[in-house]
Every structure is written in C-alpha cells, then in structure tokens.
Amino acid sequence: MTEKIYTILSINPGSTSTKIAVYRNETIVIENTVRHSTAEIEKYDSIIDQKGLRSENIAKTLEEAGVSLEEIDVVVGRGGLIKPLESGTYAINDAMVADLQGPSAIIHASCLGGLIAKELGDKLGLPSFIVDPVVVDEFEECSRLSGNPLIKRRSAFHALNQKATARRYSKEQGKNYEDLKLVVAHLGGGISVGAHKYGRVIDVFDAVAEGTFSPERCGSVPCYNIIELCFSGKHEAKELLGYQVGKGGLVAYLGTSDLREVEQMINDGDKKAKLVFDAMVHQIAKDIGAMCAVLDGEVDAILLTGGVAYSKMLVEAVSKKVGKFASIGVYPGEGEMLALTEGALRVMRGEAQVKEYKG
C-alpha cells in the first residue's frame, strides 16, 4: 500500500527571525529563516502587531521556493506561553487564540506561531496545530513544592525538543517512548534537564529560573543572596531580571554566549574561561544526576541535545561525569521544525489523537 504523502507547513517565530519549513512527510522540501532587522521590528508597538509582516514574509518565502499554498495539507506553529497542558498536538481553537493574545497573555514571539498557523489554516480550510509548547506540564505533585508555600515550582522547559529527542532515541532502539525512563538535557542558550518516565516529564529544572547556568542565563542562584541584592538599593529589578535571562551565565562571566569563543579562550590558556567552563559542566552533570535520582536510579539513557551539544569538548566533559549512570546519546541541534512536523504527522496518520485546548 502506497504511503499517503502529507505536505506540512511549519512556522517557528523568534524575537528577530521567523523560521519556515515545508515537509512532505518527514522529507524536507524547504527550510528558511527570515531575519527581521531591529528597525523593522521597532515599527510595531507590540509583538502581536508583527503578525501581518511575518505572514507576508512566509507567503513570499513559499512563492520564491515555488511552493503553492494550495499544496499544503496542514499548518503547524510553535506554541506560545498559554496555560499549562499535557504533551501532545493541539488544534488551535478560539480559546487558545484568546490566551495567545488576550490582555492577560504573556506575549512572546512564539505566540505568533499559533496565531499565524490558525489564520492560514482558516483561510485555506486546513487543520492548524501547535505541538509541545514550553508550558507542557506533566509533573508529579511532589515536584510542584518549592519549600515555600508562596512559590510553586513550574514546568517551563524546552518541551518540543526534549520530547522529540526522546521519541527519536526510542525509535532508534526499537522501543516505545512510553516504556522507557530517560534523562534529557537540552543544552542551548537556555538549559533544561528533565526526567522522562514512561512518556511523561515528571520533573524538570525550569529553563528560566532553575538549574545550571547556561550561555546566557544564570539558572539557580542562592536565594538569600538574591533577596539581599534586591533590597540593597544598588540594583533595579530590570537589571537583575536581565541577569536571569539574556545577560547571565557565560555572558556575565566571560562577555560571550558563544561556546566556540569560550573554547578558543581555553585553548589560548585563559584560566578564567576554563574555570567557568568547568563550572557549567559541573552544574549540568549535577542536574543530570538529580534527575537520575528522581527516576530512582533506573535510567535507560541520558540524552544530550540542543545547540551546545555540538561542542565535543563539553559533551566529552559531561559524559565523563555521568556516563556511569546510563548510556549517553548525543543529538546536537534543536530540530524544532522537524519536531513540529512530526507532531502534526502523528495526528494526520492517526497515530495520536489531536487534543483540545480548554484554556
């Protein structure tokens, strides 16, 4: 029997770019990144107002690549910061649209992925989906307690890539993701390490507020000292929040978020760079060890993914520390466009049920 071919348009907006890909099943047809200049972006009062610009760029990219909108069978977009939900592929409905752009929405460029996919899908009479947004929440209840009743731990992580990497590894092993215990570390500008237990991420270090420092985030820092800094009168809230996301980690210590530059510093004999690199490796390994403990020490594999996983120096250093816990699998890069496509395909092929977002 001939396999049915689905043509999928995947859309992944970032703060200064829009990634666009067209796949026929798992085979890529085109993949392009449209860069948006600061001057272009600053014309708009809000991120949501950029929807028209981004949609025009998508249409132009497809036209230049010789891909007609009439060829598309399904549109899938990167999900935004909506309400917590289980992993899966969700139809973009009115409740989701309201939460992506309403007055109480946490506006991020990724919100445009769902909004543009919905607009295009409705225009063409096609289904539109999002897949595994950063708010995927499958925590066990004990994972939610922080130690302070005023603060609840949250599940906010690189769910799309972590889930896709876990499924990819499982398929390679001829096993079901739902039958394995895995620790997945997404190593990128932000870092998140999750405990995957039989298809659910039961605990994870929040990619913004917890865990190891990363190329541009400071991760967990001693809370007592943070409270002192906040009330010292020497720092504005905006400055301290900047250290948390964007100006922390490698940037704060070494002035760069590019690990290749850090490696060159080390090779040139820079002792501070070596210390900071070793500290990040130490913390990544510590987070992986913690998630191994969450899984009762019964771990089928530890998977390293994300852009930083291209660093042979870092992968070798981390593997040396945690390799005795379980076998190591390395999947460099983020693979977001394929992950979005695979999520849509699972539904179109009847391998998974499309889920309803209830807001």
Image (cartoon, rainbow, N blue to C red):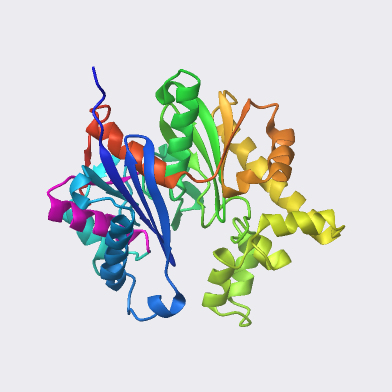
Q: Where residue 280 sits: x, y (%)? A: 70, 51
Q: Where residue 192 sits: x, y (%)? A: 54, 47
Check if residue 335 falls in the magenta segment.
no
Q: Main secondary structure of the magenta part?
A: helix
Q: Where residue 81 sits: x, y (%)? A: 35, 57
Q: Where residue 304 sits: x, y (%)? A: 59, 38
Residue 303 vs residue 14: left or right?
right
Q: Residue at x 62, y 42 (%)?
A: 287
Q: Is residue 100 above or below residue 126?
A: below
Check if residue 129 falls in the magenta segment.
yes
Q: Can the viewer see residue 198 in this picture? A: yes
Task: Specify start and end residues of the magenta stretch as a single range.
Answer: 109-131
The quarter of the rendered structure image containing the N terminus is: top left
35 or 94: nearer the eye?
A: 35
Q: Can the viewer see residue 104 in this picture? A: no
Q: Is residue 298 above or below residue 192?
A: above
Q: Is residue 91 above or below residue 221?
A: above
Q: Is residue 287 above or below residue 320?
A: below
Q: Residue at x 81, y 55 (%)?
A: 266
322 or 297: nearer the eye?
A: 322
